Amino acid sequence: MKMHSLDMNDLPSETSNFSDIQVSEFPEKRIAALPIVDPFLVEADLPEDLTNAILRLLSPDEVVFVALRLNSSHHFSDEQGKEEKAPMWMALTGTRLLVVAVASDGRVYADTFDQRSIFEYRNGLSGDSLKIEETSLFSAIWERKRWLLKEAVRLFPLPVYEKYLSLAENAIKKGKRLHAVPLLQKSLEHTPTLKAYTLLLSILLRHERHEEAEALLEDALQRIDPIELFEEMLRIFPNNAEMPFYLAATCENHQQWDACLHIYQRLLNKAPDFDLYYLKLGEILNTKQEFEAAIELYQKFIELRTASEKFQKGMFHSWDIEEFHLFSADPDLAKAYFDIGLIYEYEFKLFDLAASAYLALLRHAPFYTDAYKHFWQVYQQLFKQTPDAAPLQLHIPMFLQTYQLLAPQNYAANVTPEQIALVEQHCNASAGLPERYHRLKEEDDERLMHPGEQEYFRRVQHWLTTLVISKDDSEGIEAYCEQVGNANYPLLHELIERLANFLDIIPPKCFISRGKIGISVRNTEHPFIFIGSEHLQPDNERFFSQAELVFMVASQIEHIKSGHLLMTDTELWKSLGSASFDGFLLALQCLPAGGFLSRITHHVATKGLKKVYTMTKASGMQRWFDFFRKPADSDEEKSEEEQEKLEDAEGNGKQATRPESLFKEQVVEFARHAIYTADRVGLLACNRFDAACSGIFKIAGQGFSELDDLQSQGLFSILQTRDKRGNFLYFEYAKRFSELIQFALSDAYLLVHSNVVIPSKTASAPPVEPVIVHNHPDNSVLLKERLKLLHDSFRNDLLTPEEFLKKQRTLLAQATCFDDEDLQLIEKLQGAFTDGILTGEELEQKLLRLFEK
């Protein structure tokens, strides 16, 4: 039975912690032998001989609800005429009232009254009294004695099940909900009632005892009417949404469709904007074969769900690799899309609408392999009807590449070579590696950027301005590594120029590292590509094919273009053992979600940490390493007061007092989304999803071992690989490929591809816009941002005035928009700053005005 987790906000919070109390458990050994329902209703000083006397009077299944000592006595007389006055005790069972007294010699007086007895209760100043038939019983003056007698009188006429139910309600009122559980269970054993089921279910769900809740509802549907139970739930808990959901799900298991419809329709009337009700009603009507109404409800659910704030924040998405076809997707939304597609495909034969539903599903749940099969089936039907038409905004060759790499066996069973050849004849989108590109336009550049990258950049931008920009440490690479040129690596050199021109930046230098693997970008001020030589040797197993090389180089150039190094080439990144931002990205993508930071101390040598520890004392970075040096499980818990202060600071937009929280949740997300953007550009450049995947695996450590099985087993199977301890190895890869597939199947990919890619079959035709190595563009926008970052570092006392001026001069020397007169003015302004005539803020403002001029 599938349950939807909801919050229960209708009940007050617990005031104390109570463990489950079974009917036969008691704090006092002297009364442990008696079958007491609730120890609180029994006086704790029961004598042992009295306990034995009561036990002999009880039938096998009889229990004691109330037991108290009365302010009455029984007179025993022996054969010699001596009298003994013994106190009288009252014991209330399920159906009887026992009055017992025990003499010192063991003699027992007992009187029994059943529920047919006529009784009269009186409340007096000196004590209460109870007259049953001809017997008068009195309580002591103490409040507890009087209260116990009142409870006995109140419970005496009630049936057994109502006695249990009454005690349970009292426990709930006092906040002792778990104390009420066994009482309600006993009540249901005697007589099932709507109220007992409702109260017990509310407690079980409140304390997340879901299996017991499901078993309770299974039992309820065998004994009572579900609609009556639902009405009782609304009467007692009118604002509780979780209980009706569990009841409706149980009704679904029993195929009680009318009861399900009644429940969801009533709930929908109370909350017409709650999306899940539409989904459940759609599923039920689909089962009842009322397809048109079902589709209308499904579509309303999709509209409400996708517009919700929780959906936009990814709160409905599943990250469970156990159900990998739903990984990174909202399972409810996937269900709605798939059901709509099936109805259109099989019931209405509306193949265009079915294809649209399946495509929407794939763009949301990229690992949903059944959707690939069904989409291809309906696409074939559409193709037979109108082969020259293009009813869908989809790059069909990219779809087929993705389908084949994800699930090769499924692909082979459903896609034939004849179908592929026929489709490619009428398909406008190219399937091969592009030979030339039109220069990327600004609007296409925006389509390529992952929306999450800009969002997380905005969140971390202020924090990053407090970090120290590190000095260039790449001179050794440039001095001793082989630089790529037209003479030694003509194809790679030409590829870098072509891709840089395509992305509209100055072609970066490229250096070869002998005997190394991987590809990265180095140097903040003059970025260059650094590539391991093994990827360029044809006899090496990590050799990049032409399409793989295009993907990798284009991705790295995108990192340069987007300024990822500018934001991250700081002392912090180097302290993490990563010589560049790309090194951090490569480490990140190979670790489980959330695992990078918790395992960072395993990846950074202790010696290196000590060196950085000393290095960063003067730069205000000490607090970071105090955090990183602690074991992952030793984080101190914040007090409630400290936590409130932290939340208040974050809520007011202030810098948080605990920087590791920002680092974990936002900087790492920025890094992830920077990868996603670079992957998009790489895929667009190579136009081959299989090349993108194999290239990513070839620069990996552990993931490289899976490359041989990629074509045979498929990406879907490989991403579910576990280690010896049962942990999933490729969680980050799964997230990365999920994002890449979603882009590959998007209308944005088809649009940008048609705008910029000149397919190989038309390579001889002249491009619309000549593609040549262009002169240096105006880089004023980038330089202004870097000047602002530099000034923020100076303003936060992270740079001395001398260091500030030196770095500022280095940045301004890169400007292409200044003439000689401007440069002379800049020199005078900097002199005025040195002489104390201008402040740092005034200098910054005057330099920015020069850029605007």
Image (cartoon, helix red, strand yellow):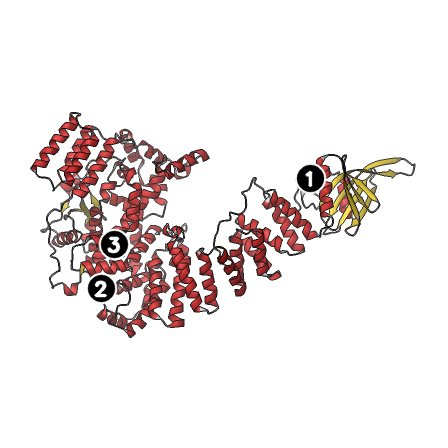
Tell me the kind of residue under disc 1: Lys
* Disc 1 + disc 3, Cβ < 8 Å: no
Q: Nearer the viewer, mark 1 or mark 3?
A: 3
Q: Spot the residue most to the bottom.
A: 385
Q: Which residue is mark 3?
A: 447
Give percent across and percent down for residue 346.
39, 71
Residue that appears at 46% across and 35% down: 640
Inspect the image, locate mark 2, and give the three-letter code of the amino acid beneath it. Ala
Is 795 displayed left or right of 289 in the figure? left
Spatial CA distance of label 3 from label 2 is: 21 Å
Q: Which mark is residue 29?
A: 1
- Determine the secondary structure under disc 3: helix
* Left or right, residue 619 beside residue 344: left
Residue reaching furthest top? 835
The tag earlier along the polypeptide, 3 or 2, is 2
The residues bearing labels 1 and 3 have C-alpha atoms spaced at a distance of 76 Å
Left or right of 829, for residue 641: right
Badge 3: how crowded within 10 Å, few (<14), some, or many (20+)?
some
The numbered dot on residue 431 is 2
Is residue 327 something that shows in the picture?
A: no
Are dots 2 and 1 in contact, CB under 8 Å?
Answer: no
Along the viewing direction, whichever of 24 and 676 lies nearer the viewer: 676
Q: Residue furthest left?
A: 820
**Kind of residue at badge 3:** Arg
Q: Can you give x and y, in whole percent of width and height, for residue 18 in the image?
A: 58, 42
Mark 1 secondary-structure assignment: helix
Mark 2 secondary-structure assignment: loop
Q: Which of the two discs, 2 and 1, labels the residue nearer the N terminus?
A: 1
What residue is drawn where x is 14% and y is 54%?
498
Q: Residue at x 77, y 47 (%)?
A: 97
Of residues 178 and 656, which is closer to you in this image? 656
